[in-house]
Amino acid sequence: MSGSVFMKVALAIAFLATWAQLVLGAPLASLEKRDVFVPPVLYPHAGTVWTKGQRHNVTWDTSDAPVNITNKIGTIFLRKGDLTTPLILASGFNILDGRIEVTVPWVLPGSDYSVVCTCPSLA
C-alpha cells in the first residue's frame, strides 16, 4: 500500500471513529478541571539589578493561590522582554513556599529581564 493511500485510510478511520463517538454520545476524552497557579513575583521587581554568580531570593505572593492546585511543584523561568526563555532558574520546589534562592546565570546584559514563577498542570 503506498504512503498516500495509507494516509487516506488512516484519516478515514479516524474520522469515522470520531463521528461514531459524537453520534453515540460517548465522550471524546476525559477532561478534568486543572488549576494552574502563576503567582505574582514580588522580587525581583522593576529596576532590580542582578550580577552573574550572585544568589538572590525570588519571592512571590501565595495569598491568592487556588484551593485545589493540580501541581504544587514550581518552576522559575527567566524572561527576556515578552519571551519566556528555556533557562530555568529553579525547579522542583513547593509553589506555596513563597520564596526560593537562585543563582544569577550568565546572560547578555539588558534591562528587560524578569522572572516568571509557575506550576503548570500535569497532563
Image (cartoon, rainbow, N blue to C red):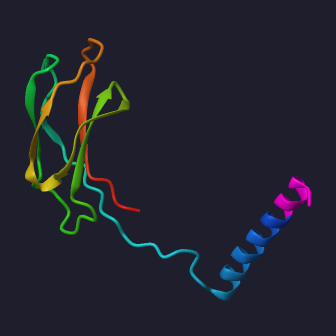
- Vertical placement of residue 56 versus 15, above or below: above
Q: In this view, does 118 lie to the left or right of 61?
A: right
Q: Residue at x 34, y 59 (%)?
A: 121
Residue 106, image quadrant: top left
Q: Give the range drawn in magenta.
A: 1-8
Q: Which SS type dominates the magenta stretch? A: helix
- Residue 11 % position (x, y): 79, 64
Q: Which residue is drawn at 62% across and 86% down?
A: 25
- Residue 28 % position (x, y): 58, 75
Residue 94, image quadrant: bottom left
Quadrant into which the N terminus falls: bottom right
- Which residue is more in the foreground, 119 or 23? 119
- Vertical placement of residue 29 versus 108, above or below: below
Q: Residue at x 74, y 69 (%)?
A: 14
- Residue 18 % position (x, y): 69, 74
Instruction: Report how many numbered discs are placed on residues in the image.
Output: 0
Identify the residue at the far bottom of this view. Answer: 24
Identify the residue at the far top of this view. Answer: 109
Asked if residue 4 is among those painted magenta in the image, a careful observer would answer yes
- Vertical placement of residue 16 versus 52, above or below: below
Residue 72, image quadrant: bottom left
Asked if residue 90 is among those painted magenta in the image, a careful observer would answer no
Q: In this view, does 9 lie to the left or right of 79?
A: right
Q: Residue at x 28, y 18 (%)?
A: 107
- Vertical placement of residue 85 versus 14, above or below: above
